[in-house]
Image: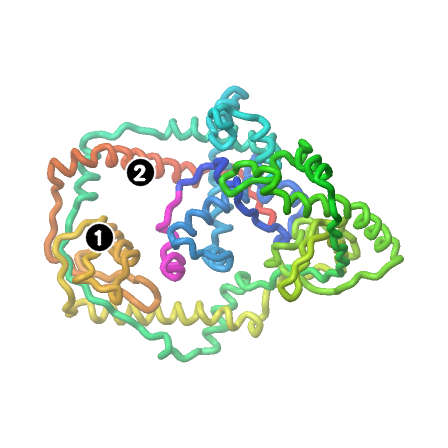
Amino acid sequence: MLTWMQHHKKYLVVTIWISVIAFVGAGVVGWGAYDYNQNRNSSVAIVGNEKISFVEFNLRYNQIYGYYNQISNGALSEENAEKLGLKDIALNSLIEDKLLLNFAKNLGLWANENEVIQELSAAEEFQNVNGIFDKNIYYAILKQNNILSKNYEQILGDRIILNKLNKIFEFPAKENELQMLAASYFMQDALEIAKITFDKKDLAVDENALKQLWEAHKNDFKTQKSYELSSYFIEAKKSNFSQDELRAFYQNENNKFKYKAQDGKILDFELAKEMIIKDLSLEKTKNLANEKFVTLRNQKDDFQKDFNISEEDQNYPLELLAKAKNKDILKPIIWQKCENKICKDGFIILRLNQTNPVRVKNFEEARSEVLPMYYSEVAQKALEEKAQKALPTFKGIELEFVDRNSIKDAKKVSDEILNNAEFSFFLSQVFNTDQNSSYVLINDSKAILYRIKKQKLNPNKQDFNQYQTMLESSLKTLKSSEIKQELLEELKKTYKIKIYH
């Protein structure tokens, strides 16, 4: 599935809007991997007069990650997300939003306080059991996700402005345009198809060609930013707290929304008791941790352990380390130390000994990473040559009339030829070209030859009436997208884009 997604990700178009659901209970992206200059404390990028904040990027990345994870049946790992370039997709989508936002504000579009309040009030996540907006829930959820209310409300305001701008791009669907779209949408082809494969095991490596490929793409192969650290762990000692102490801690207004079940409901005291004991133990150990911090800073004690971490070690405070200078000692942070399957809660104090910045790998270091790209490019070229040679005379499986949304007939087309996802992609390519006979590359080892035997162009009235609303919506979206893309190309020439990583 990952190979298919990598090869065809440009066809996986996602329309994304900022929403509360994007961050409630979601993780965040670590920023220790990047080296920011003067704007690193506040922005991922600046587009014209508009900044892209860390909060916005994390929200957008989580939305896109969630979408791709859904279409890969929950099997998408962070490593595969990196291969798919989801961070770049998130950043580019935000850049486009900011270009349009600059344009909208220059047109005089804006969002007032009442519009933002209406947007907040309509969000179910911030409503109590009676369906009424509850500011305590609102602030608690934002605090839980390390988002300031002013930042979130700014994001909502921007969304309102973009919604207003989008209405400018809405054009009514004309009857002749609908008929043309319907003809295209409901077009049916009778096809003859055949599978062509190429085995990459047959490929020999041309070292000169491999090195040339690395030269052309060497900036894509970099070391990870890493940190050389020393640490000191202070274990939280669990005491025999009285019921009154535990209940007072539980009822403290700062802890009121801390203990929740998966459904978001607040846990009662007994169910939350173990978590309360842990948190109260940490609270009681805080002063000891701060004292140890002063002792280490004054060089009156030694750190316990030296080790290195990379940008993939998301458990560590990468954002703080990215801002620190060599020999800086970070203040104590809550930590769980796990050794031999035994975990202890407490605080950790870290000293940054040295930062090793990102650098381009030399050929020897990058060779194993370049090889898959080399094999893929050479195999794809060989596969295309093989497909072109076989195309004029191939004989294959005949499919009765299919349209772009047809479901695979497993009796005629086995998974060995095309699985369901590949079959859908194959049909989309056939119906998006004007060639009667050609081939579709599924990946770098498989292509499908096809020949159109017969064609039906006219949709029947029943289909047209059934899908008219959908066709009108698709046509409006299509026209709006075309105009918006042309506008974006012009806006890229107008507004300066600075990316800080």
Residue for badge 2: 478
- Left or right, 83 with reference to 138: left
Percent x, y of residue 95: 50, 41
Q: Is residue 301 magenta?
A: no
SS of the residue under disc 2:
helix
Above or below residue 129? Residue 73 is below
**Who is closer to the viewer here, 195 or 128?**
128
Percent x, y of residue 267: 57, 38
Residue for badge 1: 407
Binning the other alpha carbons within 10 Å of mark 2 as few (below 14), some (14 to 19) or many (20 upward) gives few
Binning the other alpha carbons within 10 Å of mark 1 as few (below 14), some (14 to 19) or many (20 upward) gives few
SS of the residue under disc 1:
loop
- Left or right, 345 with reference to 421: right
- Left or right, 244 with reference to 261: right
Above or below residue 382? Residue 19 is above
Let me know if residue 49 appears in the view. no
Q: Identity of the amino acid at label 2?
A: Leu
Q: Is residue 10 magenta?
A: yes
Percent x, y of residue 78: 51, 56
**Who is closer to the viewer here, 131 or 138?**
131
Q: Which residues are drawn in magenta?
A: 1-14
Above or below residue 112? Residue 324 is below
Q: Identity of the amino acid at label 1?
A: Ile
